[in-house]
Amino acid sequence: MSKTENIKKAYELAKERYAEMGVDTESVLKQMDITAISMHCWQSDDVVGFENPDGALSGGIQATGNYPGKARTIEQAQQDISKAMSLLPGKQRLNLHAIYGDFRSGTVERNEIGPEHFDTWIDWAKGQGVGLDFNCTLFSHPNADSGYTLSDNDPAIREFWIEHVIKCRDIAAHMGRELGSRSVHNIWIPDGSKDLTVNRYKHRAHLKDSLDKILAVKQDASLMADAVEAKLFGIGLEAYTVGSHEFYLGYAVANKMMLCLDIGHFHPTEQVSDKVSAVFQFIPELLFHVTRPIRWDSDHVVTLSDEVRALFEEIVWADKLDKVNIGLDFFDASINRIGAYVTGVRAAQKAILLALLNPTPQLRAYDENGQYFERLALLEEAKSMPFGAVWDYYCMTKEVPVGTDFIAEIQQYEKTELSKR
């Protein structure tokens, strides 16, 4: 019996098993087809970008390792990301940072960038058939050397960054217009202090005022949507971060905008999955950055961890899969970067699939009837169901490598492409 026949046979058996639990695997796979994951461009080149390829990272960000073959041009980054996408089932998008624009015609200050610097990416996205998301870049720049940007005490510094973010929102709207797919623009800033400060209130008042000025410039909501992202602390910013969870949660609720929850941006004992049902009571749409923090925000390649599984279970159990935007955020320079992409995206997709394969209606019935032993038992039994057979079948039907087959293909790509850089 051929491998294809074995995969089909295993799937049919799994389909019957899941049906006994009240789960329709065909409907689940249709949902997988429309659940997009926004891949992050910065895994391709270790968060360097193309504004100043020889520049150093700053703002509490660090990529460790020196594995050969990183992308050094836009064409190489596009080639690598296209290769990664060709090995993935389902639907992808690409998430760009402002420093990844096409600046080959000359240096452009960040408060002067425009849509024309991203037409190279828009053309690529049209060819790939994917949408683009966007991020303003408020790190790795002399105007961030004080440790503050939108919350700096210097009004000239604040104005510079306000102009930058306004330009980035224009670029996101342009992407949405050109691609016919709304672009999510995420605002994250590195602002904070290494040691104690008595000016927490003042800096946060500056940040609120800066955001108010940025959002006063209206955009078409069908073309772009804003999100704000919190962080607990950063390297060199250990005492406090201006844009804390409490600050941005309050700001998002007050301004009826999206909140970004990054798995790595909270205390190691906090579970972002537990925040899903709470935050959705007040905010209708969320952005998630899925990563793997080994020691806080270390941004390791995503794996099928307990917290990643729990995150997507909570989203599915809340019936909010259509109200979340899923992005990945990791940058590992110590391993093959295309391998990191494929491993991380597949892990997130597996977590989504596992959540959708849960017998949710029966679990809810047990829960609401106070049948807690039955609820617990069913949750445990669901863990040993033949999920792998459904995943393999999904990959096969999408004509991408099944199982570990993608490893050899990435190894070959390293020999023919990456090793020559």
Image (cartoon, rainbow, N blue to C red):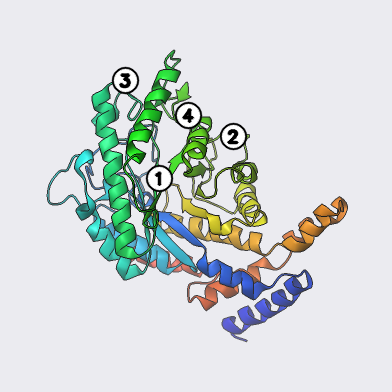
Query: Nearer the observer, disc 4 or disc 1?
Result: 1
Residue type indicated by callout 2: Pro
Q: Within the image, what quadrant is residue 348 found in? A: bottom right
Q: Residue furthest left?
A: 105
Q: Are marks 1 and 2 in contact (CB under 8 Å)?
A: no
Task: Let me know if residue 420 appears in the view.
Answer: no
Amino acid under disc 1? Asn
The numbered mark, 2 or 4, whose residue comes first in the sequence reads 4
Q: What residue type is labelled 4?
A: Phe
Q: Name the residue under label 2.
A: 268
What is the C-alpha distance between the residues marked 4 and 3? 20 Å
User: How many neighbours does mark 4 have within 10 angstroms: few (below 14), some (14-19), or many (20 or more)?
Assistant: many
Front label number (1 vs 2): 1
Image spot of residue 388 (x, y percent): 64, 67
Q: Is residue 300 left or right of residue 352?
A: left
The secondary element bearing badge 1 is classed as strand
Q: State the quadrant of the C terminus.
A: bottom left
Neighbour tally class for label 2: few under 14, some 14-19, many 20 plus, Cα within 10 Å: few
Q: Which of 213 and 160 is in front in this view?
A: 213
Left or right: residue 177 versus residue 311 is left
Contact check, label 4 and label 3, Cβ < 8 Å: no
Residue denoted by label 4: 233
Is residue 142 placed above or below 40 in the rendered structure?
above
CA–CA distance between discs 2 and 3? Answer: 31 Å
Q: Can you identify the residue that label 1 sits on? A: 186
- Label 1 Cα crowd, 10 Å radius (few <14 / some 14-19 / many 20+): many
**Nearer-N-terminus badge (1/2):** 1
- Does residue 45 appear in the picture of this structure? yes
SS for dot 4: loop
Q: Which of marks 4 and 1 is nearer the N terminus?
A: 1
